[in-house]
Image (cartoon, rainbow, N blue to C red):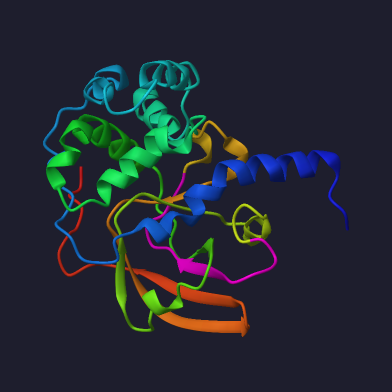
Amino acid sequence: STASAGEKRYLVCITSIYAHRVSDMIEEPNRMMLPIEGYAQQPLVSLEKAIAPLILIVPDIERKTWLAIENSKTPADGLTSGESASIMLYSMEWNKKEESLYYILNSTLRKEKRDLLQPWFLYLKLMLTGLGKLPSIIGRTFFRGVKGDFSKNYQQGNKIVWWGFSSCTSTINVLEQEEILGKTGVRTLFAIESKSAKDIRHHSIYPDENEILFLPATQFEVIGQYQPSKNVFIIQLQETEPLYPLRHPV
């Protein structure tokens, strides 16, 4: 059946927002790095104070923070307004994706130089505290996708770590949109069984996205691969616990 005009507008919207975040596993370093730590000892402060060290790092962050706070007056799930606003700020897309807070933060989380994370400590403490109040989703499968063949990086039995925040969708047909996988050409689909993912829809600037978020430094085991056609690779991942913590609990 053909999509209605409203559904088409929704798919265009969801795709333009999701496209990069659902596909950015290709920017992961694909190696073990030092744990993410240092933020847990920080105090919980307001979002305005938490972003103060980021003003010279993230363009236009003060105005975007104000917008997030204005939209988080009555937060769901028992979060404080500051915790909810910190997640909303993460969900926002700047006009240039490279200037978005989520893009700069994830790029920093994926770098070996852990001292680069120091300006982010107050923000990470606030956001991870809020995410910690959301229920973990156990046993459900979520999806990510990317154009190209990445099967060689995900061999069966291997354990891999995604160091950035990892966005997924619970609706596999979203990935068919041209900006993500499309319907032609070589493409790789990830089916990921969750133990700790968070549904951030009630704290996103785009609540209709139904965005699912894995926290930084989450480890997965490659359960298997499947190639249903010449150009399509499906990789099955299962979230697993690392031998030692890779991210300090807040």
Residue 115: name its quadrant: top left
Q: Position of residue 157 (x, y in %)?
A: 34, 83
Residue shown at 57% from the left, 83% from the top: 227
Question: Vertically, is 199 above or below 41?
Answer: below
The foreground one among 197 and 60 is: 60
The foreground one among 78 and 232 is: 232
Question: Vertically, is 210 above or below 46?
Answer: below
Question: Vertically, is 190 above or below 199?
Answer: below
Asked whether, in this view, residue 244 is left or right of residue 183, the answer is: left
Asked whether, in this view, residue 118 is left or right of residue 103, the answer is: left
Q: Which residues are magenta?
A: 182-199
Residue 170: name its quadrant: bottom right
Residue shown at 38% from the left, 84% from the top: 156
Looking at this view, name the residue that lies furthest to the right. 1
Residue shown at 53% from the left, 31% from the top: 205
Quadrant where the image shows the C terminus: top left
The foreground one among 97 and 52 is: 97
Residue shown at 35% from the left, 29% from the top: 83
Question: Vertically, is 164 above or below 53?
Answer: below
The foreground one among 77 and 208 is: 208
Q: Position of residue 135 (x, y in %)?
A: 41, 48
Quadrant where the image shows the N terminus: bottom right
User: Is residue 154 among the parts visible in the rendering?
Assistant: no
Magenta segment: does it hold 193?
yes
User: Is residue 93 among the parts visible in the rendering?
Assistant: yes
Asked whether, in this view, residue 75 is left or right of residue 226, the answer is: left
Q: Position of residue 194 (x, y in %)?
A: 43, 63
